[in-house]
Image (cartoon, grey):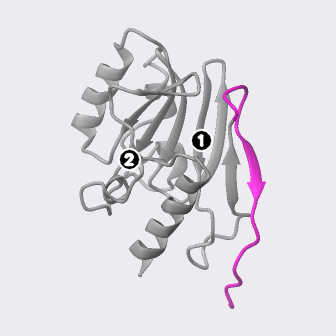
């Protein structure tokens, strides 16, 4: 059922000429979003409205570092890297693959959009920003923060736009 709803959502976006970009996460079989019509973001990058975007799907720590090295050595600056991994500053236990300091060693990469954990966090620094958007809706009772979506125009940091939330009875 969820796949049917997601496919209808992608078709509605397409009907309004709004692209949907994706990378595979740790729960995805292959890249189901791309199979349904979303645009897969490759390591080699894509251009969209003057913004150069690269993607790294869920992977091992070793492969993540190899992919970051490849992307960092591209002949053009990366405006946005979309990746599926766990950053140390987003977890309260030792299961991370990357730290903010390690990420900033890749000087060709300005801004980072990271998914994997539902923690919401925006970190800004001299190089750009690292955003973990959290989830658009509360997933379980432990997610007590305000949920929503983020808008990025290509300039400055992303802006948070809260969404109405479903009620979870406690």
Where does the C terminus fall, quadrant-wise? bottom right
| Residue 101 point in image, percent of width and height | 49, 26
Please tell me whether residue 164 is drawn above or below residue 70 in the rendered image: below
Tell me, yes or no, whether the two marked residues, 2 and 1, touch with CB atoms within 8 Å.
Answer: no
- Residue at the spot x=58%, y=47% of the render? 18
Relative image position of residue 149 (x, y in whole percent): 67, 54
Q: Quadrant of residue 45?
A: top left
Quarter holding the N terminus is: bottom left
Callout 2: few (<14), some (14-19), or many (20+) C-alpha neighbours within 10 Å? many
Q: Position of residue 112 (x, y in %)?
A: 53, 34
Observer-side mark, 2 or 1, equals 2
Residue at (70% x, 38% y) in the render? 158
Q: Position of residue 88 (x, y in %)?
A: 47, 44
Q: Secondary structure at mark 1?
A: strand
Residue 4 disc label:
none
- Marks 2 and 1, how far apart in space? 16 Å
Left or right, residue 60 beside residue 105: left
In front here: 43 or 59?
A: 43
- Closer to the chain start, of discs 2 and 1, is 2
Q: How many marks?
A: 2
Task: Give the residue displayed 72% in from the left and 74% down from the top.
Answer: 165
Q: Disc 1 marks which residue?
A: 131
Label placed on residue 23: 2
Question: Residue at left 50%, top 61%?
Answer: 11
Judging depth in this view, the residue of 114 and 32 nearest the camera is: 32
Magenta-colored span: 153-170
As for residue 2 lying within the magenta part, the answer is no
Q: From the viewer's perspective, is 3 left or right of 92?
A: left
Residue 120 appears in the rendering: yes
**Quadrant of the rendered structure where residue 128 is?**
top right
Secondary structure under the numbered disc 2 in the rendered image: loop
């Amino acid at each position: 059922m969820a796949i049917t709803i997601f496919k209808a959502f992608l078709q509605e976006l397409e009907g309004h000429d709004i692209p949907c970009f994706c990378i595979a996460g740790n729960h995805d079989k292959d890249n189901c979003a791309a199979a349904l019509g979303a645009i897969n973001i490759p390591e080699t990058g894509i251009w969209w409205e003057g913004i150069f975007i690269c993607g790294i799907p869920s992977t091992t720590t070793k492969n993540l570092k190899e992919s970051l090295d490849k992307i960092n050595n591209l002949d053009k600056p990366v405006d946005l890297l979309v990746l599926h991994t766990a950053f140390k500053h987003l977890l309260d236990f030792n299961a991370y693959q990357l730290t903010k300091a390690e990420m900033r060693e890749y000087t060709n990469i300005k801004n980072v959009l990271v998914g994997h954990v539902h923690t919401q966090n925006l970190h800004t620094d001299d190089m750009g920003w690292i955003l973990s958007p959290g989830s658009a809706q509360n997933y379980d009772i432990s997610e007590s923060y305000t949920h929503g979506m983020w808008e990025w125009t290509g300039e400055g940091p992303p802006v948070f736009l809260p969404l109405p939330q479903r009620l979870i009875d406690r």
